[in-house]
Amino acid sequence: MQRYQVTRNNPRDRSEFRNLSGVLSITLKTLSTKYGDKTDSYLHVGSGAEHLQILPNLAVIAKEINNLGLGRLAKTRWREIVGAGEYMAMPVVGGKPVIPGSSVKGNVRARMELSFIPKEGRVRSCLSVGGGMPSFGRHGKIWSKGLEYDRDFKCPPRGRFMVCLMCDIFGTKGLASLLEFSDFVGERVSLQPVSDGYGMKLMAAPPGSAFTGEISFRNLSESELGLVLFRGLAIGDDGVGKPVLLGRLKYRGKLGGKVFGRVKYQLNSLKLSTLSQPLSTLKPGETASGAMLQTVIKALIDSAEKEFNGEYYVADEVQPLGMA
Ligand SMILES: [Zn+2]
């Protein structure tokens, strides 16, 4: 099998501001027919420490132990007391469910890495994150085009600190990321229990849930920032994203008859740092929203399409699963 050479360069200087720096304000929404999407979707994202979770109603139970006879309590609430069959919660910060920034970053990075294909024998991404998944099953089916080309090796090669474009932007061992992801907070999201009746029980974000967060960027060119928007976040000229997959059960697709893992990103505003270069008609320190934001998004995406012409493809993540 032919191995394609990954295009690598010296990583850019992290200590100075060049090109574009600023903050993207993003909303991540679970699909909802109520808001015009083709399907209703739930979302569950793990904290990675589920076995350490504390029952959310522990305080209530403790209070009731003082008020009621223990015998009666044990009869009615024994499941909660022993934790039998408890629902897996999502991470909660300040009483609100959150999608950890690391989960969003992994999602965006994998999508960008997997979108690159070779041009003239060379390819931009070493698949350091996106290649960690099997090339069979639904992941393999969706990303078959990106996975079919073998790469020489993962960054950085021994002895030399040269990295591919993706490792330069997202960071790698010994190299800081140029993108920082905040946690995405569900301000008005109330988790609902979903169960398949056989033991898998999740507290999940229902259709139409909105999680807001920020992605700060530094030292990116227009085409690179455009790539983050239209390939990483699957956002179009209007700032609204196409349906993409995220979180638990995204490939299995359903639990207890409910669709899982279909979300879309939306860009609400773009703020340039005072240390940034201007972007289109947007000056350093200014924020673009509304019509101005659409102009800026279009300029960024046009720049990315021109710079990376023929080096990427756009996968439909939702269609191959047979559930729009
Ligand atoms: Zn790399």
Image (cartoon, helix red, strand yellow):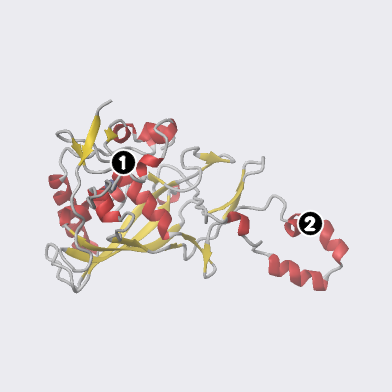
Density class for disc 1 (Cα within 10 Å; few <14, some 14-19, many ≥20) is many
Residue 219 can be seen in this image = yes
Give whichever of discs 1 and 2 has the lower sequence position: 2
On the image, the x and y values in percent for residue 319 come to 38, 35
Q: What residue is rendered at 25% in x and 54% in y?
A: 168
On the image, the x and y values in percent for residue 298 come to 17, 53
Q: Which residue is mark 2?
A: 78
Instruction: Please state which of residues 200 and 112 is positioned toward the viewer in this rendering.
Output: 112
On the image, the x and y values in percent for residue 187 come to 47, 66
Q: Which mark is residue 114?
A: 1
Asked which secondary structure carries label 2, the reply is helix
Amino acid type of the residue tagged 2 in the rendering: Trp
Q: Quadrant of residue 309?
A: top left
Q: What residue is rendered at 18% in x and 72% in y?
A: 275
Q: Tell how many labels.
A: 2
On the image, the x and y values in percent for residue 294 come to 21, 58
104 in relation to 70, above or below: above
Q: CA distance from mark 1 to mark 2?
A: 47 Å
